[in-house]
Image (cartoon, rainbow, N blue to C red):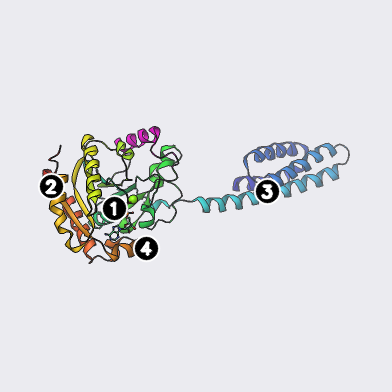
Amino acid sequence: MTAGIALIFIMRDFIQDTMGRLIFLYFIAALAFRIDAKLPVAAAIMLLAGASVMISKNEAFANSLAIYAYYFLVIGAVQNLIEYVSKKKKTEGPKDEELLLIGEKRRFAEPEKSRIIAIASGKGGVGKTTIAANLGASLAELGKRVILIDMDLAMPNLEIITGLKTPPAGLIDVLDGTKKLEHVVYSGPSGVNVIPPGVMLEGYSEGNTEKIRALFKDFPLKSDYMILDMPPGREAVNVLSEKMEALLVVNPDKASILDALNMKMILSRKDVNILGIILNRAQRNDEKWIDEIERILESPVVAFIPESIVVREALHNEECFVEAQPESKPSKEIMNLAKEISVNFTYSSNNKAQ
Ligand code: ADP
Ligand code: MG
């Protein structure tokens, strides 16, 4: 556009003669199809058409029409420039330096392969999103490169807890081919990288499931951990596959534990390695549940997170409690879990059911 304006300036004497007017006409026509400011351009075209009709009858008049056309064109170009700049500002995603671009921002040695850990449960509302965000932030605190992916296409809320407000694009835009993956990665707490789902009306349709599976197979961004905040239900499990791992979140109630057992069986059928169980929203005397959970689910309870005001407050403030209240009991539990995960590759004794 700037080049267009410069060209008009350079040509402003030249456009006074007939040959110049023809070229100028051609130039306007080209611009008219390419720029948004259609009104001033249309006015310029009409004036120029008038000028070319008048040229043989009244040259002076035709010349002044051409000059007015030129002014309209400049107005159009300026208007277009303003629209272009303001539109760009509105739709601008995160700046390049805010993007993941792992390896450029932080130069860790690349791991053989990133570990993909799904935070799953049988039932909704048990604390998956809360745990996914805080576990991701804890691993990032330990210096790991973490990508948190919100797999809840219908009710995404990882964005809230990681303070992203309304990210302009997400996974769906990558599946559609309209965005590159690195352009839907946002900076979250403790340097964790977050991929929101975007507006995905069809949810886990067959097409989307296939595309997500393909994306995971050949994930273009490097990281140490990918933490998947899973939705409740079994549809999303279809994107998981062997070599992936899972943590099952349960609350201290029978329904939640039996639903988790169901989920565990589905995951085991997919050869997903169950790292352990997180007992969340527990009361002080709920430790008695640990044995029962381990017996029913045949997996170790790897974290015991109490029902806590710290968790609720952090959600309310749109932040991670491991950052806001690192000394609290929930933070210590999650931090310990993060350390265990990063030290032990797997909890090898946990898949007795397989
Ligand atoms: P899910 O992702 O499994 O649906 P969420 O992480 O969204 O569950 O949690 C559901 C609700 O429970 C949220 O309001 C969250 O703040 C609350 N919550 C989760 N864990 C705790 C906890 N340990 N103490 C208090 N509130 C909790
Ligand atoms: Mg959730």
Position of 115 compared to 51: left or right?
left
Quadrant of the drawing holding the C terminus: top left
Question: Label 3 is placed on what type of residue?
Answer: Gly
How many neighbours does mark 2 have within 10 angstroms: few (below 14), some (14-19), or many (20 or more)? few
Respond yes or no on whether mark 1 lies under 8 Å from ligand 1: yes
342 or 2: nearer the viewer: 342
Residue ID for mark 1: 126
Please state the horizontal and vertical placement of residue 61, each as a whole percent of the image.
85, 45
Residue ID for mark 4: 316
Position of 40 compared to 123: left or right?
right
Which comes before the other along the chain, label 1 or label 3? Answer: 3
Which comes before the other along the chain, label 2 or label 1? Answer: 1
In the rendered view, tell whether residue 59 sits above or below residue 139: above
Q: Is residue 205 magenta?
A: yes
Which comes before the other along the chain, label 2 or label 4? Answer: 2
Residue ID for mark 2: 295
Q: Residue at x 32, y 63 (%)?
A: 312
Q: Residue furthest left?
A: 349
